[in-house]
Image (tube, rainbow, N blue to C red):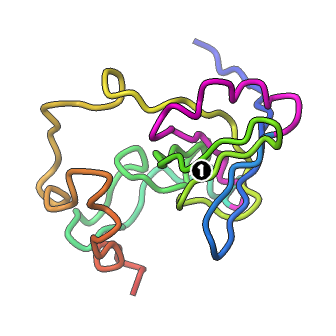
């Protein structure tokens, strides 16, 4: 199988501020928001543009990123935005949708201001939730549910977070 390049075009950008986050969708994609306001959560696929360098794209392994983790992990075993293709996915709650203005209001997401949004998909339990999840021992103590993550002390889990 030969390698092939693909072209991706952002559909909008993240606007991050002290009062929350807004996904600003470009005018030509705003009709794609029709029907989204009925969903409580969405998956936002975004491009980690600050880490899109040749150097970061070559990284395939990370030295102990997690305090309780092994001494090294392959990048595909992490949620790090440093990857061969810096594509990230965040599941976020939907607080509101304004189709005319192209806005999706969300309380928080792990992306920076002006981050390019590649796509939005509705979160649906029949596709996105898994009943029998298996996790390695080093991260088994992490929250089991999205809602519990906000109260979890994530800073104590990352080696370089201190």
Is residue 32 located in the magenta-colored stretch of the structure?
A: yes
> Viewer-proximal residue, 134 or 106?
106
* Residue, disc 1: 58
Residue 137: horizontal and vertical position, in percent? 11, 55
Q: Quadrant of residue 150?
A: bottom left
Q: Residue at x 77, y 25 (%)?
A: 31
Side of 155 relative to 51 (left or right): left
Side of 27 relative to 120 (left or right): right
Mark 1 residue element: loop
Q: Residue at x 12, y 32 (%)?
A: 132
Residue 90: horizontal and vertical position, in percent? 50, 47
Is residue 33 visible to us here? yes
Q: Residue pushed farthest right?
A: 27
Is residue 43 located in the magenta-colored stretch of the structure?
A: yes
Residue 131: horizontal and vertical position, in percent? 16, 31
Compared to residue 126, the image places residue 21 above or below, namely below
Residue 77: horizontal and vertical position, in percent? 34, 47
- Residues rendered magenta in the picture: 26-50
């Amino acid at each position: 199988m030969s390698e092939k390049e693909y072209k991706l075009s952002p559909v909008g950008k993240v606007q991050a501020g002290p009062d929350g986050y807004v996904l600003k969708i470009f005018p030509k994609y705003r009709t794609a928001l029709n029907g989204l306001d009925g969903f409580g959560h969405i998956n936002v696929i975004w491009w980690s543009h600050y880490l899109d360098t040749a150097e970061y794209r070559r990284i395939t392994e990370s030295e102990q990123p997690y305090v309780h983790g092994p001494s090294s992990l392959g990048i595909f075993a992490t949620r790090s935005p440093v990857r061969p293709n810096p594509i990230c996915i965040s599941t976020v709650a939907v607080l509101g949708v304004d189709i005319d203005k192209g806005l999706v209001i969300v309380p928080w997401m792990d992306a920076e201001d002006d981050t390019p949004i590649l796509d939005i998909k509705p979160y649906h339990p029949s596709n996105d939730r898994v009943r029998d999840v298996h996790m390695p021992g080093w991260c088994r103590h992490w929250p089991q549910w999205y809602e519990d993550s906000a109260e979890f002390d994530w800073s104590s889990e990352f080696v370089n977070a201190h």
